[in-house]
Amino acid sequence: MPMRRIRLTVEYDGTNYAGWQRQKNALAVQQVLEETLERLTGAPVTLHGASRTDAGVHALGQSAHFDTESRIPGEKFSYALNALLPHDIRVTTSEDAAPDFHARFSTCGKRYRYLFWDAPHAGALNRNTHSHSIYPLDVARMQAEADALIGTHDFAAFAASGSVVKDTVRTIWRADVARNGHEVVLIVEGSGFLYNMVRIIAGTLRDVGSGKLAPGALKKAIETGNRLDLGVTAPAHGLTLMKVFYSTEDI
């Protein structure tokens, strides 16, 4: 059987995992999927993901691919994998992909969502998906702040310490903030994101929305490149990778 390339769309609750990427001393989503694929195909499998989500971060639309000589039809991998995977990881689609498709390097953009819960008390049922803010958040103020992100900018100030990426220029085409009861939703779409960039944006917007930080922080940080002009990094559990774009028609 010739080698084939299979593309997966993966949904997972990141609460119990040390992120997407396989690690030596902790359990990662990639490791669980690779070990399950090996059980299924009878051969070692290397899985390539579109985004290396951090510990505690969730995904509804993580994209990944692997090569295999298995005869299992592409669309059937999702069913076979879900019969073996733990309940907090699910493969929502599987399909044969072109030989030159690459889950990480073929991307043209990503969509992330960050969820806040602004109420006097944290929720019990959403404790793993929403970041709690004891202070009311001014959504209009947050949206006005987020507008500064739109366009192509050098986001050097938005990279967490330890980031080794040389090119920090990214294009953001969507940054929307909306309220649904006590839930405040941030949606950000762009060509790519630096390490912890969305969480730094979310934390800054929360600080502006609560009045802790003066408006104009995002614009100032873009201009100065100084991380100290921004707010704190928001907790990982409020973040979800929603979608990976491979065609500008999908954006």
Image: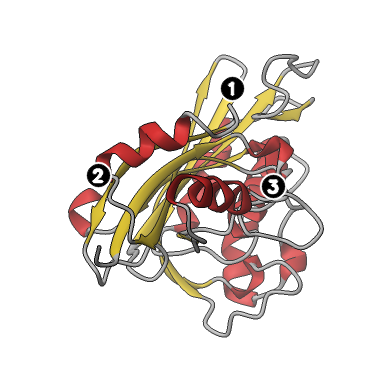
**Is residue 122 visible to us here?**
yes
Asked if the residues shown at circle 1 and circle 3 are in contact, with their CB atoms under 8 angstroms apart, the answer is no
Q: Is residue 235 left or right of residue 30?
A: right
Is residue 184 depicted above or below 95 in this figure?
A: above
- The residue to which callout 2 is attached is 73
**What label does residue 247 carry, if any?**
none
User: Residue at 78% of width from left, 43% of height from top?
Assistant: 212
Q: What amino acid is found at the position of numbered circle 1 in the picture?
A: Glu
Is residue 244 depicted above or below 117 in this figure?
A: below
In this figure, which colouring scheme has been used for the structure?
A: secondary structure
Q: What amino acid is found at the position of numbered circle 2 in the picture?
A: Pro
User: Residue at 27% of width from left, 50% of height from top?
Assistant: 71
Is residue 219 depicted above or below 245 in this figure?
A: below
**What label does residue 203 carry, if any?**
3
Q: Earlier in the sequence, mark 2 or mark 1?
A: 2
- Mark 2 vs mark 1: in front: 2
State the separation of the CA atoms marked 1 and 3.
15 Å
- The residue to which callout 1 is attached is 183
Q: Earlier in the sequence, mark 2 or mark 3?
A: 2
Most foreground residue, 193 or 104: 104
x and y percentages locating residue 187 in the rendered image = 47, 41
Most foreground residue, 43 or 186: 43
Q: How busy is the neighbourhood of tag 2: few (under 14 within 10 Å), some, or many (20 plus)?
A: few
Q: What amino acid is found at the position of numbered circle 3 in the picture?
A: Gly
Is residue 8 depicted above or below 217 in this figure?
A: above
Q: How busy is the neighbourhood of tag 3: few (under 14 within 10 Å), some, or many (20 plus)?
A: many
Residue 114 figure quarter: top right
Question: How many numbered tags mark residues here?
Answer: 3
User: Residue at 24% of width from left, 44% of height from top?
Assistant: 73
Most foreground residue, 247 or 157: 247
Q: For numbered disc 2, what is the local secondary structure? A: loop
x and y percentages locating residue 111 in the rendered image = 42, 48
